[in-house]
Amino acid sequence: MHLTVLDHPLVDHKLTVLRDKNTPSNTFRELISELVTLEAYEATRDLTVEDAPIETPVAPIIGKKLSKPRPMVIPILRAGLGMLDGMTKLIPTAEVGFLGMKRDESTLDIITYANRLPDDLTGRQVFVVDPMLATGGTLVAAIEYLKERGAKDVTAICIIAAPEGLARLKKDVDPSIDFKVVVCAQDEKLNENSYIVPGLGDAGDRLYGLV
Ligand code: URA
């Protein structure tokens, strides 16, 4: 697993406003979107490109364009949806799949309750987006699910990570997968309710209100 923690004054500023409990939902949504776009720039460094002959108004050149198959962006419902437009702004040609995962409170297993993905992800560069990397349980299950469909190149983009979640990914994600993680910050710890400390609270509630 390769971890990138962004180190940039704009990220520090936006993250501080995002964490503030007095920041309203509309500003929170905009900030998440802006932060994801900054992360996406970093996370997409290894996108594959191919030669693309074009003519500028002045001369012909061999340029570069993203090669096929198109990259796949997969938000994990519900909070990951808040990161989708920040990703598609930067990669408008990406295809979008959806994965709904939640914990079964009696068995503590992660169950997939919704999925809209191609059956075959062989050869695809996949970007999984979920704002809070807390215990890492959901992400481990999501990556296992993607691996079963042939994905071998997976990047997780999260806003804040807990050390416990990162350790779990390092331990449990199959090493045969080319797996990268990009985050804006690594926080101190999880509390007894598995919230990230200091974190930003419940990302889904702050994006969409309490339901
Ligand atoms: N999910 C959240 O929304 N916030 C946390 O702090 C942990 C998990």
Image (cartoon, rainbow, N blue to C red):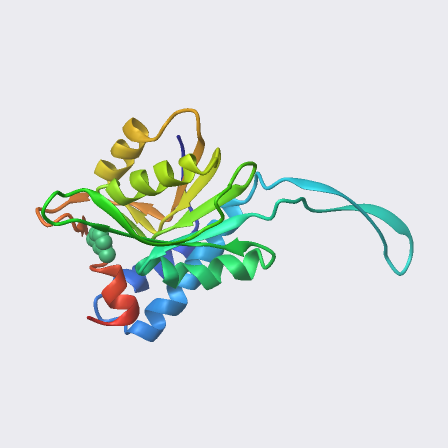
User: Measured from the top left, where is residue 192 in percent x and y?
Assistant: 8, 46
Q: Give the quarter of the image for residue 161.
A: top left
Given residues 27 and 92, the one toward you in this image is 92
Q: Residue furthest right?
A: 59
User: Measured from the top left, where is residue 30 in percent x and y?
Assistant: 40, 68
Name above or below for residue 204 compared with residue 151. Answer: below
Quarter of the rendered structure image containing ligand 1:
bottom left
Horizontal placement of 24 versus 125: left or right?
A: left
Name above or below for residue 167 compared with residue 182. Answer: above
Given residues 58 and 117, the one toward you in this image is 117
Q: Give the quarter of the image for residue 190.
A: top left
Given residues 143 and 113, the one toward you in this image is 113
User: Measured from the top left, where is residue 120 in percent x and y?
Assistant: 51, 41
**Residue drawn at 31 percent across, 64 percent down:** 17
Q: Quadrant of the N terminus?
A: top left
**Residue drawn at 35 percent across, 36 percent down:** 144
Q: Quadrant of the C terminus?
A: bottom left
